[in-house]
Image (cartoon, rainbow, N blue to C red):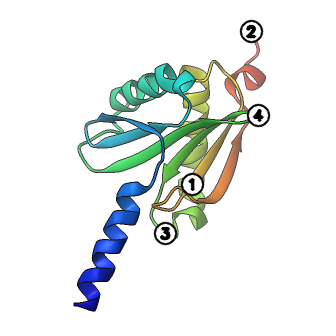
């Protein structure tokens, strides 16, 4: 009985978590907190689908903005320590900067399943790395 109550409470807590509004694309959830980011979240969902990231398996990302844009992705525990994956995250971050965030620098944040940041990878941005 005690286990059932704990599971119910955990379910309520998870269902009450507010990560913002959500757009779903082929199993990938794109959250955004600020209504001003809705178009950017929609563009992100479309771009992730176009590049094959959305494949029907559950994934969650979140777009936020403070002094710069943050692309926050839920990852499995331990991924933040994998140097090969970090290179992949940097490449994805650069592409997102170029295609979605108008070439601006972004923070690519690796998060646990509650969107608590585990690691932040600064992405310089397409504007500053590509000269015309």
Task: Measure the C-alpha gap from mark 4 to mark 1.
Answer: 18 Å
Residue drawn at (72%, 31%), measured in percent from left and top?
A: 105
Task: Measure the C-alpha gap from mark 3 to mark 4.
Answer: 27 Å
Task: Measure the C-alpha gap from mark 1 to mark 2.
Answer: 31 Å
Decide which of tag 3 and tag 1 comes sooner along the chain.
Answer: 3
**Mark 3 — residue?**
77
Task: Measure the C-alpha gap from mark 3 to mark 1.
Answer: 10 Å
Task: Measure the C-alpha gap from mark 3 to mark 2.
Answer: 40 Å
Cβ atoms at labels 1 and 2 below 8 Å apart? no
**Mark 1 — residue?**
110
Task: Select label 1 or label 2 by which is in front.
Answer: 1
Question: How far from the left and from the top, in percent, is residue 128?
Answer: 78, 24
In the picture provided, is 117 more to the left or to the right than 10? right
Residue 89's label in the rendered image is none
Decide which of tag 4 and tag 2 comes sooner along the chain.
Answer: 4
Residue 132's label in the rendered image is 2
């Amino acid at each position: 009985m005690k286990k059932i109550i704990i599971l119910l409470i955990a379910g309520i807590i998870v269902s009450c978590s507010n990560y913002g509004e959500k757009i779903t694309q082929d199993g990938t959830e794109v959250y955004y907190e600020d209504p001003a980011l809705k178009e950017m979240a929609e563009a992100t969902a479309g771009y992730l689908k176009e590049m094959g990231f959305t494949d029907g398996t559950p994934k969650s990302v979140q777009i936020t903005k403070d002094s710069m844009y943050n692309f926050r992705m839920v990852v499995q525990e331990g991924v933040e320590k994998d140097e090969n994956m970090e290179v992949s995250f940097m490449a994805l971050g650069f592409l997102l900067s170029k295609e979605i965030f108008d070439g601006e620098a972004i923070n690519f944040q690796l998060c646990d399943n509650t969107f608590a940041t585990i690691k932040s990878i600064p992405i310089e941005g397409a504007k500053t790395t590509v000269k015309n």
